[in-house]
């Protein structure tokens, strides 16, 4: 397995920033990455997307319930006070858009990846197969998300 480097990480960051800015109409600031446990508490919503191909693993997009409602509200252009089926669909689509954009960037760089459909989890979740991952916090007016990259590059 090859070590992840900026060429593996930056496409995810660029895609997440662009999609959040374009769909939520916010300026996004990328914070300093840290290694962090992939476990979440009762208030968290986590979009989980698997990756296969020249990279393998998972990308997790985690946010609090308040931030999930804020993002869904911005995406749907209406106030969302709780994550129901409609808001869940919007959050899942956010994951699809981010990962689709990242896959396009990788493809243009000659790296082939495939993505799984998103799974939206809520509550206490812990990932035993990837106990720690690179976590990149992304902040914007009215909220934040944590982008977890639990990946390995194939040699």
Image (spheres, rainbow, N blue to C red):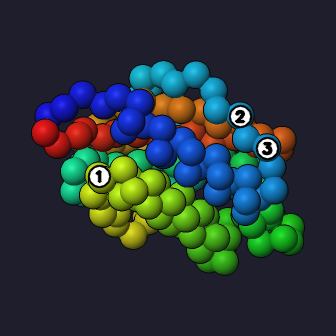
Residue drawn at x 80%, y 49% is 26
- Where's residue 148, x and y in %? 46, 39
Question: Which of the two residues, 129 or 49, is positioned nearer the viewer here?
Answer: 49
Question: Which of the two residues, 100 or 42, is positioned nearer the viewer here?
Answer: 100
Residue bearing the label numbered 2: 29
Mark 3 to mark 2 CA distance (whole Å) = 7 Å
Residue drawn at x 84%, y 41% is 141
- On-image quarter of the C terminus: top left
Circles 1 and 3: CB atoms closer than 8 Å: no
Badge 1 marks a residue whose secondary structure is loop
Decide if residue 120 is on the left or right side of residue 16. left
Residue bearing the label numbered 1: 111
Circles 3 and 2: CB atoms closer than 8 Å: yes
Residue bearing the label numbered 3: 27
Residue drawn at x 41%, y 48% is 59
Disc 1 versus disc 2: nearer the observer: 1
- On-image quarter of the N terminus: top left
The local crowd at label 2, few if under 14, some if 14 to 19, many if 20 or more residues have their Cα within 10 Å, is few
**Quarter of the image holding residue 149?**
top left
- Where's residue 117, x and y in %? 39, 70
Badge 3 marks a residue whose secondary structure is loop
Residue drawn at x 34%, y 66% is 116
């Amino acid at each position: 397995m090859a070590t992840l480097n900026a060429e593996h990480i930056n496409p995810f960051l660029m895609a997440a920033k662009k999609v959040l800015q374009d769909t939520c109409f916010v300026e996004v600031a990328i914070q300093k990455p840290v290694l962090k446990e992939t476990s979440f508490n009762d208030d968290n919503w986590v979009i989980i997307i698997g990756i296969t191909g020249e990279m393998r693993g998972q990308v997790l997009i985690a946010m609090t319930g308040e931030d999930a409602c804020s993002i869904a509200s911005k995406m749907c252009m209406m106030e969302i006070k709780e994550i129901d089926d409609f808001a869940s669909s919007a959050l899942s689509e956010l994951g699809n858009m981010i990962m689709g954009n990242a896959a396009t960037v990788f493809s243009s760089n000659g790296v082939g990846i495939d993505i799984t459909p998103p799974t939206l989890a809520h509550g206490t979740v812990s990932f035993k197969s990837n106990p720690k991952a690179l976590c990149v916090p992304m902040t914007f007016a009215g909220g934040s998300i944590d982008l977890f990259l639990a990946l390995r590059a194939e040699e």
